[in-house]
Each structure stands twice: as C-alpha cells, then as structure tokens.
Amino acid sequence: MSIWRERAENLFDLLDDIDTADDVAKDNDVLYRRMTRALQAKRWDYATTDGYTLAWKDKLPLKFEMFPGDDIGIDDLARTTYERIIGA
C-alpha cells in the first residue's frame, strides 16, 4: 500500500468517525462537540500546517496499539510487517 493511499484511508477513517459521533451523540451538542474535537485533533498525527502550507509527517501512527499507551509510528523496517497484518 502506498503511503498516500494509507494517509487517505486514515484521514477518511477520521471523517467516518466524526460522522459516527453524530449518530452516537444525537440531541447532545456538548457530547458531539467533545467527541468531534478529540477526533479532529488526530489529524495532527498525519500532517502539520502553518495555516498556508501543509507538511506531511514521515511516520504514520498505527491503526491499532501494539503496546497500549505507547505512541508507535511506522518506520521502514516495520512497514512490511504492518502491511501484512492489515492485509495490504
């Protein structure tokens, strides 16, 4: 899987999670805002911006936690293992 496809899928997953938050928090604006703020903040795992340009990060976070509590990114050595796990 290319890094661009992986980035697109991960960012689409965030959008899908925000859509799901809308279903979960029906008629509860406070809950929806909390959920949405937490989800949208995850975009910084993939890129940064100064408000004018977008800079992609070299390492992507895993879609699952190998070691709960640790922030593990995908480096070149682990990439093939990760792709095999997710079936890419």
Image (cartoon, grey):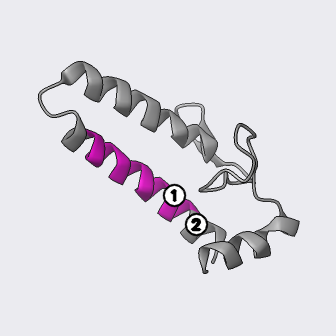
For the record, the magenta segment spans 7-21
- Work out how far the residue at label 2 is from the one at label 1, CA to CA, in angstroms: 6 Å
Q: Are marks 2 and 1 in contact (CB under 8 Å)?
A: yes
In this image, 12 relative to 61: left or right?
left
Q: Which mark is residue 6?
A: 2
- Toward the left, the furthest residue is 27
Image x and y of residue 13, in percent? 43, 56
In this image, 1 relative to 10: left or right?
right
- Toward the top, the furthest residue is 30
- What residue did someone put label 1 on? 10
Residue at 53% of width from left, 39% of height from top? 42
Nearer the observer, 32 or 3? 32
Q: Amino acid at mark 1?
A: Asn
Residue at 56% of width from left, 60% of height from top? 7
Residue at 60% of width from left, 80% of height from top? 87
Image x and y of residue 58, in percent? 75, 54
Whether 12 is drawn above or below 1: the answer is: above
Residue at 64% of width from left, 75% of height from top? 2
Q: Mark 2 packing: few (<14 Cα in 10 Å), some, or many (20+)?
A: few
Image x and y of residue 85, in percent? 67, 73
